[in-house]
Image (cartoon, rainbow, N blue to C red):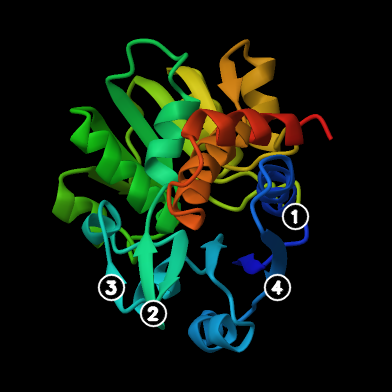
Amino acid sequence: MKLFAIFGDPVAHSRSPLMHNTVFKNLNYPACYTRIHLQDGEKLRETFFALKLSGANITVPHKEAAYKACDEIRGFANKVGVVNTIIQENGRLIGYNTDADGFLFAISEFKDINSVLILGAGGTAKALAAKFLEEDMQVSVLNRSQGRLHFFKEIGCKVFNWSDFEISHYDLVVNTTSAGLKDEELPAPQNLIEAILKNVNYAADAIYGKVTPFLQMAKAKGLNYKDGADMLLGQGVLANELFTQKSIEKAAIKAAMQKSFSL
């Protein structure tokens, strides 16, 4: 019996155990998945081995710490320095990033996305920005301060903080901050969010399971919007493929995970 987990702070809200355990149970894969509340990202590696995990997902705020904890990084995670999925191979931790492809899956119904504004500058923002640029989109990033914006400027994004933001039209605005997860906060001052939502076609939030204040404002303005549920599903399918060493068809994983959302 293999053991998998999700590390985060907070993590009690996570649907990942239900999603992955539904796959394991319905498809007869000998594994179990649990939650680990980890406050100090520097302890991720030692905690992983202490619990004898076979693999893990990582959520906020530990995705960059997870990158540092790995012995080897594969695929897209190399580009962004952010890991949300870890596999243990012969005592070594192998890091991947499935967030970006999961998000593209989530917004596939939004049409003609050429310009994107990302709110926040953490691990999820890094992954999405790099993926959007790969897809030849114009990417802007708005963060509270300049401190975390260097990465985005280096890869070709326009960057702004709250005091120097210039309003433009965007096809899509995405909240990647934790604002609204445990509170009723907005990801930027209300006057900025109001101006942004007047100049976009679509809105999305990486947070799932609730209509955040950000999405409530988008809804009030009649915008098409999505929470992070489909992103969670998309990245979860790809992560489960890695957990099960691609021994289960992707379509079967997706079908089982979709069932979990009705439980």
- Write the residue at 31% across / 79% down: 71
- At numbered mark 1, what does the secondary structure look like: helix, strand or loop? loop
Residue 76 visible in the displayed image: yes
Label of residue 37 in the image: 4
Task: Name which of mark 1 and mark 4 comes first in the sequence.
Answer: 4
Image quadrant holding the N terminus, namely bottom right
Q: Position of residue 223 (x, y in %)?
A: 57, 14
94 sits to left or right of 197: left
Instruction: Write the residue at 32% across / 11% down.
Output: 112
Q: Where 128 sits versus 49, above or below?
A: above
Circle nearer the viewer, 2 or 4? 2
Q: Position of residue 111 (x, y in %)?
A: 39, 10
Sequence-first disc among 1 and 3: 3
Q: The residue under label 4 is which amino acid type?
A: His
Looking at the rendered image, the disc whose residue lies closer to the viewer, 1 or 3, is 3
Q: Nearer the viewer, mark 1 or mark 4?
A: 4
- Disc nearer the start of the sequence (1/2): 2
Confirm or deny contact between disc 3 and disc 4 (CB under 8 A): no
Q: Residue at label 1?
A: 182
Q: Label 2 belongs to which residue? A: 90
Distance, label 1 to label 3, CA atoms, is: 33 Å
User: Which residue corresponds to mark 3?
Assistant: 72
Residue 213, picture quadrant: top right
**N-term-proximal mark, 3 vs 4:** 4
Query: Would you identify the image quadrant in which residue 230 lies?
Result: top right
